[in-house]
Amino acid sequence: MNQTKTKLWTKDFIILSLVNFFLTLIFFLLNATIAFYALNEFNASTSQAGLVVGIFIIGALIGRVLTGPITNKIGQKQILIIGLILFTLTTLLYFMNYGLTFLIISRFVNGITVGVATTVIGTIVALTIPESRRGEGIGYFAVSTALATGLGPFIGLYMSQHMSFDMIFGLCLLLGIITLPIALFVNIPIMNTTVVKKDNSGAKLSSLIEPKALSISVIILIMTFTYSSVLSYINLYAIELNVVEAASFFFIVYTAAVLVSRPFTGRMVDKKGANFIMYPAIILFGVGMLLLSSANNSLTLLLSAALIGLSFGNISSVSQTIAVNSAAPQRMGLATATFFIFFDMGNGFGPTILGLIIPITGYNGLYAIMGIIIFLTSILYYFLHGKKESAHRLRMSKLK
């Protein structure tokens, strides 16, 4: 009986991980190719191409903000199915060639639907995972994101070099269609709806975000902001270093590092607390960025990819566990939405802001600055969360 209660690899967990993998794969596949599409198909300027990429994340942000308050009112499964249907329908818009403005609008609307669907998936996963194994469970769930992060750009760049853009959009549409029947088989845990209604009354800030998740969300904002420098500019940096072939495998190495470490780090969070992983991971992330800043050959570049995968790949999943654990069960939807809003803000605004710095610092200077910021964030983490968790674990050990 107890063994069944703490079972992790349930049908629902596997389905949600699969749907999340497909959605994230589509996101990164399109992100790696859509700017090139805008430049080639519509003769867009580089700033317009950047808007085509970034508007999707702004749409996802709006989708996440909308999802938190309405999830408990309408129901998670209903929102998930609606989100996936609308995502599939808006993916069809990519096939309609009505100019650059229409493409920007299509990206924005498509982004909203992804924001809705992925936020609900994150909430449902947190509810289906046994509380005693939540760190491990979210860690394994995040593997689906890590795999998509590596494979998405790889597949997208390969297809853009060898196939038409309609083939790329066709693959995205096919994956979107596949998610629908799979998601129908998900069972949603029942929550105390009386508490939920009371909690969501009134037009307060707490009905849009979870205040208890804000501290760790600030940390993930800084982490994703710094990581966006890698996501957006690694190819241009590789051209400058003349290691373009190695750069194509950067995210594959990153993904491999995440997959190797994830089974251990998730369990450690449940047994020893988030601090046990977060402090070393933040330091390792800083080291990885400094190594990247001084890269002068393929080996150094790929070694930095492994270090960044071991560190940032685990920071993101552990931070999500902290955010979810900070909230009451009926507010997990808001906690998940809050976490991903800050996550997307870092990824969304980072490339634009950092793009203004590159002409001054160069790519190696940029990555060195990011490394220093990451090291300083370990101090901020201590004051925002680490100190509080240490005190809590000390109290718990005394009670035992």
Image: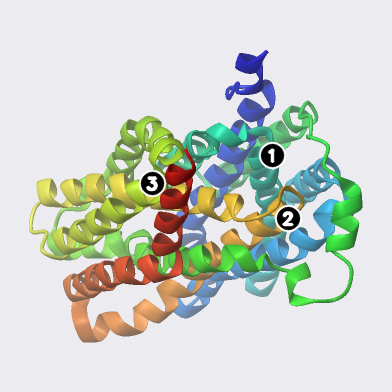
Q: At label 1, which amino acid type do we have?
A: Leu
**Which residue is label 2 attached to?**
331
**Of residues 245 and 78, which is closer to you in this image?**
78
Answer with mark 2 or mark 1, whichever residue precedes in sequence.
1
The residue type indicated by label 2 comes to Arg
Q: Is 297 placed above or below 14 here? A: below
Residue 34 percent location from the top left of the image: 52, 59
SS for callout 2? helix
* Distance from the alpha carbon under mark 3 to that under mark 1: 20 Å
Quadrant position of residue 109: bottom right
Closer to the chain start, of discs 3 and 2, is: 3
Q: Identify the residue shown where x is 22% and y is 72%.
A: 372
In the image, residue 259 sits, relative to residue 43, either above or below, namely above
The residue to which callout 1 is attached is 127
Give the side of residue 65 with respect to residue 170, left or right.
Answer: right
Is the C-beta separation of discs 3 and 1 under 8 Å? Answer: no
Q: Residue furthest toward the top?
A: 1
Q: Are marks 2 and 1 in contact (CB under 8 Å)?
A: no
On the rendered image, what quadrant is the N terminus found in? Answer: top right
Label at residue 314: 3
Q: Taking 117 as reference, is 49 left or right?
A: left
Location of residue 192 in the rendering, given as x and y in whole percent from the top left corner: 86, 45
| Side of 97 where 392 appears, left or right | left
Q: Nearer the viewer, mark 3 or mark 1?
A: 1
Question: Can the viewer see residue 4 in this picture?
Answer: yes
